[in-house]
Image (spheres, rainbow, N blue to C red):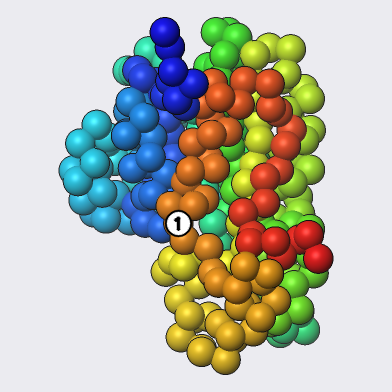
């Protein structure tokens, strides 16, 4: 008799994870490999991605600038031809420039939007071109609680704007591709204890503020986000699409 836990397996599936060398991406790759998938780690830091892939075992590493259309299309085409399939895409690569709005340059705005928003579109489109003919696939985007909230502890307008866009992009493409067997969901973490928020972690007073506004009273761990991503990518979420799952210790419930 099959176990319900079997529905969380990804045996034989090919899963692409952007920003896969560290943090949430690395933790997600670990979860996917443990669930039977082959993890394809994409990161600008190829050496770190290679180290992660070597440690994981059933994984490979590639360098790719996910904001460049031609490079993204070529990478996914070549990957699908070589591996024969792309089953899962996790759009995890992210950027943040924490500055007051009046001090943020247009170039800095563009940089964050390119990584957090445009790259989600480019990678999702490229992956879907190979999922659609097979009528199967799962895409999980990294949104944020800041896609629903204005924040307030420090200014970060380009991040908030881009993550809000990811929330609605997730819904839009989920509806567009639902009848073709592709599920599109997102996770919306609060502050996750990774190098991505190292400048925040270096300020005990800000960490205390975060803990104070989080009902569960602590930061999120990368493995907690990875577990939610695994669920959304797996057959366990076979009737879930267009959903944004908050991993926030109750922050948005207030």
Residue 196 position (above or below residue 162)? below
- Residue 228 place in picture, x, y as percent: 54, 42
Residue 23 position (above or below residue 244)? below
Q: 230 or 69: nearer the eye?
A: 230
Residue 99 position (above or below residue 118)? below
Q: Quadrant of residue 3?
A: top left
Q: Quadrant of residue 108?
A: bottom right
Residue depicted at 45% across the width and 56% down the height: 222
Q: Which residue is mark 1?
A: 222
Residue depicted at 70% across the width and 76% down the height: 213
Q: Quadrant of the N terminus?
A: top left
Taking 15 as reference, is 54 left or right? left
Residue depicted at 51% across the width and 89% down the height: 204
- Residue 177 place in picture, x, y as percent: 71, 20
- Residue 143 place in picture, x, y as percent: 65, 51
Taking 249 as reference, is 221 left or right? left
- Residue 201 place in picture, x, y as percent: 48, 80
Asked whether residue 82 appears in the rendered view, the answer is: yes
Taking 120 as reference, is 24 left or right? left
Asked whether residue 64 appears in the rendered view, the answer is: no
């Amino acid at each position: 008799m099959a176990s319900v836990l079997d529905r969380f397996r990804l045996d034989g599936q090919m899963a692409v994870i952007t920003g896969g060398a560290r943090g949430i991406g690395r933790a997600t790759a670990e979860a996917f490999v443990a669930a039977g998938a082959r993890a394809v780690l994409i990161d600008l830091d190829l050496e770190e991605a290679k180290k992660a892939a070597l440690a994981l075992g059933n994984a490979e590493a590639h360098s790719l600038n996910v904001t460049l259309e031609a490079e993204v299309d070529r990478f996914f085409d070549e990957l699908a031809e070589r591996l024969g399939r792309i089953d899962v895409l996790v759009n995890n690569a992210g950027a943040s420039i924490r500055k007051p709005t009046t001090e943020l340059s247009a170039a800095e705005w563009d940089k964050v939007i390119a990584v957090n928003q445009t790259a989600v579109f480019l990678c999702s489109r490229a992956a879907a071109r190979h999922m659609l003919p097979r009528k199967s696939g799962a895409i999980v985007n990294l949104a944020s609680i800041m896609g629903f909230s204005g924040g307030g502890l420090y200014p970060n307008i380009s991040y908030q704007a881009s993550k809000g866009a990811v929330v609605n992009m997730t819904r839009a493409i989920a509806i567009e591709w639902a009848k073709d067997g592709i599920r599109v969901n997102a996770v919306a973490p609060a502050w996750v204890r990774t190098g991505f928020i190292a400048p925040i972690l270096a300020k005990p007073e800000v960490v205390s503020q975060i803990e104070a506004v989080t009902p569960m009273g602590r930061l999120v761990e990368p493995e907690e986000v990875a577990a939610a991503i695994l669920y959304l990518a797996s057959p366990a979420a076979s009737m879930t699409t267009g959903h944004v799952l908050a991993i926030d210790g109750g922050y948005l419930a207030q």
